[in-house]
Image (cartoon, grey):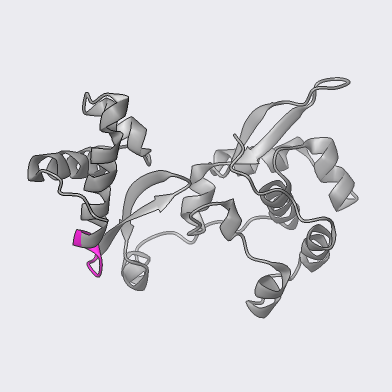
Amino acid sequence: MTMNVPDDLVRAVEATLFAADAPMAAEEIARHLGFGAGDCAAVEGALETLVAHYAGRGIELVERGQRWHFQTAPDLAHLLRRDREDVRRLSRAATEALAIIAYHEPVSRAEIEAIRGVQTAKGTLDVLMEAGWVRVAGRREGPGRPTIYATTPAFLAHFGLESRRDLPGLEELRAAGLLDPVEAVFAGLMDEDSPDLDESS
């Protein structure tokens, strides 16, 4: 049920998100506006109002990984690509590493290499972190305490995913023609026990 939200709160939430450098969670918006934890429901109501207000317009308000941001309506994205440089394509190694991290996170470089069957250069992970799609998620408890990696909210936003639970299955990837040249990796991922796609941090 949609709650009645004061217009000034809706406008404040709208302005906050418009000026934000990165997507924001409802709790972050509430803190930014000086509200307490108990006022988060009002902010969430304002977000729902804005989603309805921008539906069908040139920009829309979307939630990705429990964070909110404005984006161009998908059917108009081509209008903004005319003057933009083509994004550098990921190497096969980077594509495979990104897929493994997305489906198995958090994972260490050794675990990525075990799945790929070959060594993974540190530069490969650096490329993914520079793109903002992968982050260091801590260290694994165990010998050597290896660094572990996970995806970021920017990864979800770039690929239009609300959460990791929206990652496509093997058949969806094959139907979309997205498995070449990493079909073997995806097939291996999906043939293993399904990973737990909890929103781990």
| Side of 142 where 100 appears, left or right | left
Q: Is residue 27 above or below residue 66?
A: above
Question: Where residue 120 appears, x then y in whole percent?
Answer: 81, 43
* Any part of residue 7 in sight: yes
Quadrant for the C terminus, please.
top right
Question: Where residue 141 appears, x then y in whole percent?
Answer: 80, 22
Q: Is residue 192 above or below residue 120?
A: below
Question: Where residue 28 appears, x then y in whole percent?
Answer: 34, 31
Residue 138 in the magenta stretch? The answer is no
**Furthest residue to the front?**
1
Quadrant for the N terminus, please.
bottom left
* Any part of residue 119 in sight: no
Q: Tell me how many marks there are.
A: 0
The residue drawn where x is 22% and y is 53% is 50
Q: Is residue 176 above or below residue 27?
A: below
Instruction: Give the camera-side residue of 138 and 196.
Output: 196
The residue drawn where x is 90% and y is 50% is 117
Q: Is residue 21 above or below residue 52?
A: above
The residue drawn where x is 78% and y is 68% is 183
Looking at the rendering, which quadrant does residue 168 occupy?
Answer: bottom right
Q: Predominant secondary structure in magenta?
A: loop
Magenta segment boundaries in residue numbering: 53-58
The residue drawn where x is 79% and y is 26% is 146
